[in-house]
Amino acid sequence: MTENYRTFSNGVPMSTVSVEEGRDGREPGRQTVAILGSGDYSRSLAGRLVRAGFPVAVGSRDPDRNARFFTQGAAVTNRRAALSGAGLVFVAIHRENYPALQADRDALAGKILIDVSNNTEIHEGESNAEYLARSFPDSTVVKGFNVLSAWSLSSGLFGGSKEVFICSDDNNARKTVMQLAQDLGFVPVDYGSLRAAREIEAIPLRLLPSWHLALKMFLGVFIIFFLYCLYRVVIFRAITGTNQASHIPVSVMNMTFAGTAITLLCLVYIPGIFAAFTQLYNGTKYKRFPNWLDKWMLARKQLGLLSLLASIVHAFLSFMIWSPSYYARLFEQTATPSGDVKYGKLRWSGETFLLFGALSLFLMTVLGVSSIPSVTNAMNWREFNLVQSKLGWAVLIFAIVHNAVYGAEVFTLPGLFSSYTIAVFQLTLVLPAILVLMKVVISLPCVGSRVDRIRRGWERNKPPSRVAAPEDPQEETSLMS
Amino acid sequence: MTENYRTFSNGVPMSTVSVEEGRDGREPGRQTVAILGSGDYSRSLAGRLVRAGFPVAVGSRDPDRNARFFTQGAAVTNRRAALSGAGLVFVAIHRENYPALQADRDALAGKILIDVSNNTEIHEGESNAEYLARSFPDSTVVKGFNVLSAWSLSSGLFGGSKEVFICSDDNNARKTVMQLAQDLGFVPVDYGSLRAAREIEAIPLRLLPSWHLALKMFLGVFIIFFLYCLYRVVIFRAITGTNQASHIPVSVMNMTFAGTAITLLCLVYIPGIFAAFTQLYNGTKYKRFPNWLDKWMLARKQLGLLSLLASIVHAFLSFMIWSPSYYARLFEQTATPSGDVKYGKLRWSGETFLLFGALSLFLMTVLGVSSIPSVTNAMNWREFNLVQSKLGWAVLIFAIVHNAVYGAEVFTLPGLFSSYTIAVFQLTLVLPAILVLMKVVISLPCVGSRVDRIRRGWERNKPPSRVAAPEDPQEETSLMS
Amino acid sequence: MTENYRTFSNGVPMSTVSVEEGRDGREPGRQTVAILGSGDYSRSLAGRLVRAGFPVAVGSRDPDRNARFFTQGAAVTNRRAALSGAGLVFVAIHRENYPALQADRDALAGKILIDVSNNTEIHEGESNAEYLARSFPDSTVVKGFNVLSAWSLSSGLFGGSKEVFICSDDNNARKTVMQLAQDLGFVPVDYGSLRAAREIEAIPLRLLPSWHLALKMFLGVFIIFFLYCLYRVVIFRAITGTNQASHIPVSVMNMTFAGTAITLLCLVYIPGIFAAFTQLYNGTKYKRFPNWLDKWMLARKQLGLLSLLASIVHAFLSFMIWSPSYYARLFEQTATPSGDVKYGKLRWSGETFLLFGALSLFLMTVLGVSSIPSVTNAMNWREFNLVQSKLGWAVLIFAIVHNAVYGAEVFTLPGLFSSYTIAVFQLTLVLPAILVLMKVVISLPCVGSRVDRIRRGWERNKPPSRVAAPEDPQEETSLMS
């Protein structure tokens, strides 16, 4: 079912599913491919092979029971029968069942065994494929196809990544299987020796590794801001006698998300600046960055997207509490005959505040959209760089103005410092201020030109001739900073 | 023009269009390819063939007039001349014009005819390709390339699906054409015998088949909620004398969209639960699900997206009427000296209500984004499952809280039941309550563990040894439930 | 770093980066590939070649220093050593350094040189590749691989466009390099003779060419509306003594974005209508459209997306000023005992106004999503046409109603014309009105049927027999209009 779902998530309509039923475009002179195991994966694989014109023999423990699950093009039989006359053997069974294959050890000898297995959790040391190779020294083991789901195999229209990672200690076997992958409509990627099976088996177990660091940073920033706002808005006032607890869900959360959004955005652009300074300091680009900086760089896109999400929640919450009751000072005020205050339209500050908020959120959304893989891939570097770098800085500037105008408005409030802390909007502005300052420095002609030279291959401790040294024509001198 | 548009919709900039003009990278020793017909498709195809280095001869009724439309690399001539010396012949004319080809029957004999035609509506029975084969028994007919638009052919940068579906009763002819497709930069998919042309010709005629069921469910749910809200808010009150008709467009619609959104979200997760219970009941996963359940499963993604859209409209409408006039009970109230009520900030309930609304909408958007094909394809199963399943349930829980807090607030209102019906928010909560209950049951260790065993291949009516039976290593034991 | 970023923007997790380190799946009997230059690009290329099983020799000015940057599979040595025994030579150095290669002229003779260079700005005349060919007449020059970034080369999982554009005056050399591209997992596109290198080198320098026209139109429309609103809301009233300057940021901007949004949407559908009329006038579809119309057609998608963005900003700003202070006439009004007006819920007009605004924005978002490449590619023409054409017109109609209802409401205001100008909402409706009128005309049976006939190949100045002339079976008779 999940696979159906996955298929659908790739926009493949039901009708296509029936497609691979009952095909038999068997190509003349193609050698039989055997499949051991009769699970969903075997069934889908069989269907795909038959459609691609391969004679298929499925080796099942219980052929009679399982035959009905297979495309009629495939011969479902017992193992020995399946193996006889097959040169390629897909081993589509669990690692723990490999020993059971010893019974057919002789039948497997001299054949190419394709280990398609995956593990349920990452385990160190020997991979399934290496284990299989050790257990059947007379056979040639190739690892591959494990990244495919049963459905990506069976659905002819599957729009997903068609890359399959293949490795083996036998070059010819590897080439044979890579050719097979191509015949089945996939893009084989050569991973070299069988030891690489450890990497290949780890791929399907990945759980958004690229998000770990970004999410940690998000959480950290969020908690800091939340506690700070909590103190300013609730705890401190509670001391002074007014209970604001009922305003935690939106008022406090809203400030928190706002602060988090702008801070994360800064965290997207700071590493680029650091990188530039590091290169300046090293006087070369050929020296590795410290590990933490590398990691941070690789988390930038995720940080940007989390910043966008925080901004959206901030906007949403702001909409709902956008009223004189919450933002009195941004509204025109007149005294009613009955003596109390009547609120009218927004004041200049209020409207400016909103406009810049709107513009930065809206440009940020464009940034987010441009991060959708298929959109990114429609852009060349210059375009990507323009959007991600220039536009990103515009968003940041707008967000700063948005925040500053609001701040300027509430700045005059008595008791701003009465809580022995700076206002949230001030705290929020610290990091952006530092970032902009650094950016200005790095953009000064004297500094900037040197950074560019370094990025074009120049090195401080080399004779000037080096400047003209052959270098990467593809180099992008404009970092994401 | 539409094609231009389509091309653009794939991000191909104008400049590339000129690209295939005036190329002639003719490969030595490649056999001439003939094209019959001089429409847009023929022109684009000719351009693509020439660029790929094939000698091209176009057979036109009126060469002199049509030549100007073709890339200079192609020889535009009359049919007989085009056919002479060509082994492969693209038949790029309408089915109704096939008889006109009988004049060149002898010239077509022994050649491979590629039928690229489409129909304007689905018609049962014989496909165009089969009809062509019947009309020209001395030629070998191959169906293919019909899913390509003139522009996907002509634009070298076209980013769309590159799969072309090919079938023929002659394996060698099919292989030849599949090779040709590959030479042109497409991914051939083998559909087996010529009868499959019926399927292949139906593909371009599909009209969002995967959405039919989901849209029907959406409509059904929407209408039910609309009528119910209409009764509660307008009709019933009209009886009691207050006219609320003017509040149908937003107040009533808003309730309706809210109810629809949360109900559709439930409909995404219910089938998974049903599937689990069915498997428990059957004691095996090897028994087909009832047809209606299969269909429902396949509509889940669409249901989820429709739920997201309903949520967005609901949020939008809520923003606009979010004021004490509509939601008095969620605001702090104080009596003014002048005697009438003055509304202040939100009460605790109001803020909580909003926060959970915001969070569920925002998580739901993440879900929606993760359903964009190119995003989905960047994820492996575990990641996809985490997002679609875990996150989805979080959205549901948040939505329930959002609704319940609001309900709790209005619950005390006099006259809640006065209309002899339960409140909308109550109606809205019925299905989620049932779903959560079922989910809890299925998650109980005793039940859950058995479901997992079944999904790993275990069967009630089999000897225990079966538990270790070879099975699908790719199996995902966590359904989307 | 940027490349890391780019890699990430394609969803490739860090872990895969290590992948190509230390592979050596050298294929037996493959000829050595030489790379001149030791920049990032060379390093990544070397890694990719080694992984694909090619023996690689890197020619560096300073092998000892640079060796550490290369995968251990590659032999980093001096140029002469690298060239000896290599048949294919990647020239990965800057154009200005080509002369430096003259020293190894003899070693390069008879070899295939692959020019992968790019320029930092578009320069007319001779391309780098042609320059290289002129400088080394004894070698065969092939242009290619320049569209790839260092990272798209090194990352096995890179999800981006895999197309590489290749051209050369030597067909065999071109074929060899195209084969190499395929072996490396890319999709070669044949660009013919070496002169095409000018086009190929221009590709990475493109800066969103498809957006230029649309952005100009957007800017033009935006400025016109802004000035008009500025006059109506601020300048004129200033004359009459009321200062509204403080409402420029939101009130004026909001009107401006609203007008821009609906106008741009019209500009999406007008060219289609023009095209139809032009074809009617010409009596054939085989006559080129005027250039401006072609350009306009190709800008439609971008215009649509800009219209969506304007709508979003408009919605955002409207949310924030949505109150009786700004839209008094849309709210129910009651007089308070204290004599001044008290505002209640929305009036019928207010709610209708909102509903249609919400619906059009929401359908427009669906349109936008369907324009994401990977979503578009999951649709066939009919589906794409349904969404882009039918849905688009629905959006337009809803937007018109949204605007008209509001207008009808304020229409009665005294002083509407007092400013000697029509109201903004009226100005906004002019273009939509004209468009709808034209659409109605073109849809009249008598007119429409003729347009269809023309699009199916019929021509006024041809004998009726032509009607049955062979034509494009792929033709879409329903334009985006």
Image: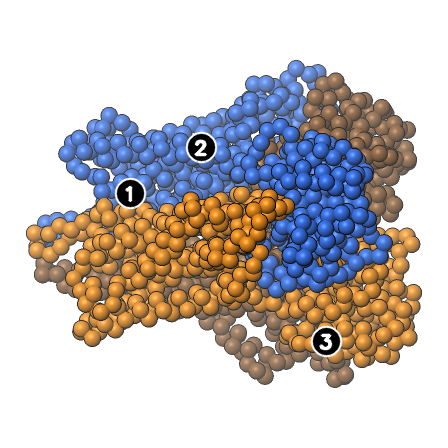
Chain colours: A orange, B brown, C blue
The residue carrying mark 1 is C249
Residue at position x 43%, y 63% from top? B360
Question: Looking at the image, is B18 positioned above or below residue C188?
Answer: above
> Residue A126 got which mark?
3
- Disc 1/disc 2 C-alpha distance (Å): 22 Å
The residue carrying mark 2 is C216
Query: Does residue C479 appear in this view?
Result: no
Residue at position x 56%, y 77% from top? B442
Q: Are marks 1 and 2 in contact (CB under 8 Å)?
A: no
Residue at position x 80%, y 80% from top? A99
> Residue A102 got which mark?
none
Identify the chain of the residue marked 3, using the numbered disc in the image.
Answer: A
- Disc 1/disc 3 C-alpha distance (Å): 65 Å
Query: Does residue A86 appear in this view?
Result: yes
Give left or right: position of C341 versus B263. Answer: left
Identify the chain of the residue marked 1, using the numbered disc in the image.
Answer: C
Q: What's the amino acid at mark 3?
A: Glu
**Mark 2 or mark 1, which is nearer the start of the sequence?**
2
Q: What's the amino acid at mark 2?
A: Lys
x then y, percent, for residue B177: 81, 42
Give left or right: position of B324 versus B161. Answer: left
Label 1 sits on a secondary structure element that is helix
Q: Tell me where residue A204 sits by quadrant.
A: bottom right
